[in-house]
Image (tube, rainbow, N blue to C red):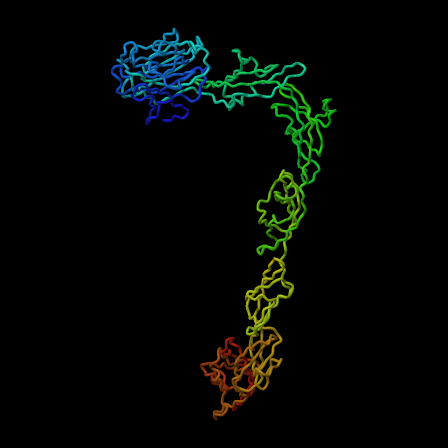
Amino acid sequence: MNTTGWDLVSNAAVDTDFIRLTTDNGNLYGAVKLATPITLSYCDKWKVEFDFRIDGNGTAQFGRGDGFTFWYLANPPTGFVSGGGLGIPGNASGLMVGFDIFNNTTEGQMSKIHLLYGTNNTAGNNIEYNTTPGSTFHSPDLISTQPFVGPTFKHVEVNGETDLTNPTNWIIKIKLDGVLIVDQSFAPSGGAIGMSQGYFGFSAATGGASARHSIKNVKVYVDKVPILNATVTPFVCTNPATGTGTVDLTSFNSQFVNNPANYLFTYYILGSSTPIANPANFAYSGNTTIKVVIKDPTSTLCDNGDGVIQLNPTPFAATDASLTGCNNNNAGTATFDLTTAALTTVPGCTMEFYNTMAELNAGINQIPNPTAYASGAAILFAKVTTPQGCVSVAKVTLNLNPIVPVTDANLRSCFLETNPSLGTFNLSNATVTTLTGATKKYYPSLSDAVNGTNEILSFLTYTAPSGVVYVKVFNAQGCYSIAKVTLTVLSPVYSSVLKDKIICIEDKTTLDAGPGFNGYEWSTGATTQSITNVGVGTYWVKLKTGDCITLQNVKVYASEQPVVTNIDISGNTVTVFVNGGTPPYQYSMDNIQWQDSNIFNNVPRGETKIYVKDSYDCEPIQINITVPNLINVITPNGDGINDAIDYSALSNKKNLEIGIFDRYGYKLFQADKSNRYVWDGTTNGSKKVPTGNYWYSITWNENNSKNTPIKFSGWIMVKNRE
């Protein structure tokens, strides 16, 4: 039950899903009506639907009830009305449709529909007795076919339509539960003649006969046109020479409704029933009231909507105005839209602009581009003409806003470790203006700044190489100046004295980054210029210069140890051959006395040591060698004395090889495991070699980590018996 927009008059009240106009008691009255009137003056059609119920114990003596009325009244009831008139006040004017269950003549029960399109002014204010010709209708008693009293709701449709054969009449159709009761033309009478607006509603009243009167599901179809403004009072003037003016009445349509193209507008001079023939060029002289009728051509029911255009001609005078523009980037001029000067509030005026009053009066040199006029501070003159042709002249003063103060600035950024040619800048830190409340935008080039293109949006973390950017600084008025910001990427600053070092692996050294830095942080945790007692390894130091930090790596290498590549032993002379490390080398056999020569003489036979070190003077390398016993003469005569050369003592050496050669280099004998490294002066296993000198060569690898190759050579005298 939605009662929004409806007024309830006591005893009417909402009861669950219906409105109870009266309870089942005597001498009660109730009504419900729309809160605002509806104008049907220009309606083609309208319709009302509702459901009603009349029930209760009633009073048997008076036919168990009275009845109720649906109405469209200019003067609806506002208080108690006795039961005889179905709740309609006396002299009420409009359309009334009564559903009567009490026969005032017989005082018995009935079911009749009464219709009055006029004034309720008959005896007892009872429309049952009103028989105004052409304005009334009384149905036969429907009690036997459609009784009004009962426990169920009955459905009613009331349709109103303009009678095209007589436009002042309405054709009224009434259906009760789908049965057509009346369908005829009714002429207004009494106060209903010329009635322009009224209220839809329902009322009931009980006297001696009581009943409960209820209604629900009320629907009023009128397609009411929504009016934005009831009255429009535009500025209009008259030509001083003629005392008249013209106006386009259609230009005000949008002030009455949204989407004026959806409606039909008709214009009347107040008091005239003849539409204005040419509303787009309406002539007037004095104060004139125009009535506007607005209709919806798509509507099938009632279209209504009246507006008023009040024309009150007054003298026209434009007012002087001023415009203030931006002297952007100190260009000396601003671009003005002269048409925005507040010269008048009259809509639809045309404006012409001139540099001098003389040019305006002569109608020459009119400014051709008033919407984009470039000028410094100046005074111009405007000729303002209203839609009615009234003319006035006003002065337009052009002013320049103060220049937005800017200064060029510099920003410095530390290099990026990933790309030392780039830095990350917070462009907002560039102090380019002292103007409070300024707005800034950042651009990569001057042309971009002027044109507002390619704006730098990530200005808080702008990554770029050394170069320039431009800042467009706006004041509160939207004016701007452009400042240049020079960007400098601070290159990494390295220590020139901190170099990689080579030391003996067992030694320690000092790493010094040198003076001139604001701070030091070593990979060891030290924060001093240098660090001591540093062994072989990789280190770094963070060198602070200003706010920038450069990471510099430094390595301490172990020096390369020399390697004994081979040793030649010739008799008591040992020659040491060395490679690697850093020459010059030094040699020793006791790790105390050192010599530059790689040759040792008079070396005793047996196991001995050789020490070698290079120019880094590191812990020397040491190898063990064996100097075999030297046998220079053998006499293989079987006497057991010097019968053979025996080098079996060297059999534990790796890759041991012993060869005996004649003076021509022919190998006579190969000593190996099979002959236990023994030579007895024979060749081919049995043949004795001639007495003479022979050469031997012995090679092996020492049993050390380097497998040092040893070569031992010499000569031997063999004395064989001939």
Quarter of the figure with residue 526: bottom right
**What residue appears at the point 53 percent right and 14 percent down from the top-left corner?**
268
The answer to whether residue 122 shows anywhere in this view is yes
Q: Which quarter of the figure is the N terminus placed in? A: top left
Residue 615, given in percent of the width and then of the height, sits at 61, 75
Q: Nearer the viewer, residue 124 or 519?
A: 124
Q: Nearer the viewer, residue 32 or 231?
A: 32
Quarter of the figure with residue 477: top right
For residue 505, above or below residue 231: below
Q: Is residue 418 left or right of residue 112?
A: right
Most extreme residue toward the left is 60
Give the mark count. Answer: 0
Residue 368, given in percent of the width and then of the height, sits at 68, 27
Most extreme residue toward the top is 133
Residue 260, given in percent of the width and then of the height, sits at 52, 22
Q: Nearer the viewer, residue 600 or 534?
A: 534
Q: Nearer the viewer, residue 704 or 641?
A: 704
Most extreme residue toward the bottom is 639
Residue 79, given in percent of the width and then of the height, sits at 38, 19
The answer to whether residue 69 shows anywhere in this view is no
For residue 488, above or below residue 32: below
